[in-house]
């Protein structure tokens, strides 16, 4: 099975991807691949890409799946920079118990933020 030429994919993405906020065309230099995964047997590639818009200054993460000749993309507006993604990517995922503790704390929250932060 042939490897996907990442340089060609990035060139295509720079041509096709637009900011979902202001529709400004992304500059290829502002697109950073955060994660990539290739499955040669299934002829599939997955990319997680971060880009900053020069026009509206928003940040967007794109999840791109390439399966044969099909390309699927999902965009999510984020306040994370690509550096922050690398930092938080190594954190342990929240557990169900963590979510229950947060829920219980919020149920008890009376609106006094100063008291809650002590």
Image: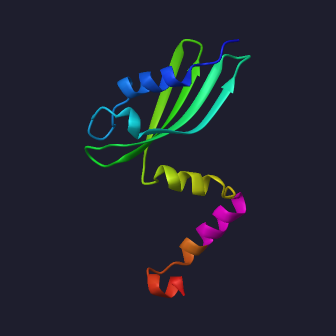
Classify residue 60 as left or right of residue 55. Answer: right
Classify residue 59 as left or right of residue 70. Answer: left
Classify residue 65 as left or right of residue 38. Answer: left
Quadrant (top left, top right, bottom left, bottom right) of the C terminus: bottom right
Which residue, as the protein is rendered here, is positioned at the far right? Answer: 41
Majority secondary structure of magenta residues: helix
Q: Position of residue 45 (x, y in %)?
A: 62, 24
Q: Position of residue 68 (x, y in %)?
A: 59, 13
Q: Position of residue 15 (x, y in %)?
A: 36, 24
In this view of the protein, which residue sits in the foreground, 76 or 98?
76
Quadrant (top left, top right, bottom left, bottom right) of the N terminus: top right
In this view of the protein, which residue sits in the foreground, 103 or 93?
93
Q: Is residue 112 visible?
A: no
Residue stretch in magenta: 95-104
Is 111 covered by the magenta stretch? no
Q: Residue at x 54, y 72 (%)?
A: 106
**Colour mode of the rendering:** rainbow
Is 98 covered by the magenta stretch? yes
Classify residue 107 as left or right of residue 99. Answer: left
> How many numbered markers are drawn?
0
Q: Position of residue 85 (x, y in %)?
A: 54, 52
Q: Is residue 98 above or below residue 48?
A: below
Q: Is residue 57 visible?
A: yes
Q: Is residue 75 above or below residue 4?
A: below
Q: Residue at x 33, y 43 (%)?
A: 53
Q: Residue at x 66, y 16 (%)?
A: 43
Q: Is residue 106 above or below residue 2?
A: below
| Quadrant housing residue 69 | top right
| Quadrant housing residue 107 | bottom right
Q: Is residue 114 above or below residue 100?
A: below
């Amino acid at each position: 099975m042939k490897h996907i030429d990442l340089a060609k994919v990035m060139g295509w993405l720079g041509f096709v991807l637009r900011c979902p906020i202001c529709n400004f065309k992304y500059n290829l230099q502002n697109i950073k691949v955060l994660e990539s995964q290739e499955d040669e047997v299934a002829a599939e590639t997955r990319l997680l890409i971060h880009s900053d818009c020069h026009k509206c200054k928003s940040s967007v993460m794109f999840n791109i799946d390439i399966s044969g000749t099909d390309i699927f993309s999902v965009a999510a507006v984020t306040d994370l920079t690509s550096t922050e993604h690398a930092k938080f990517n190594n954190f342990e995922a929240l557990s169900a118990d963590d979510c229950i503790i947060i829920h219980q704390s919020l149920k008890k929250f009376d609106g006094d933020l100063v008291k809650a932060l002590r």
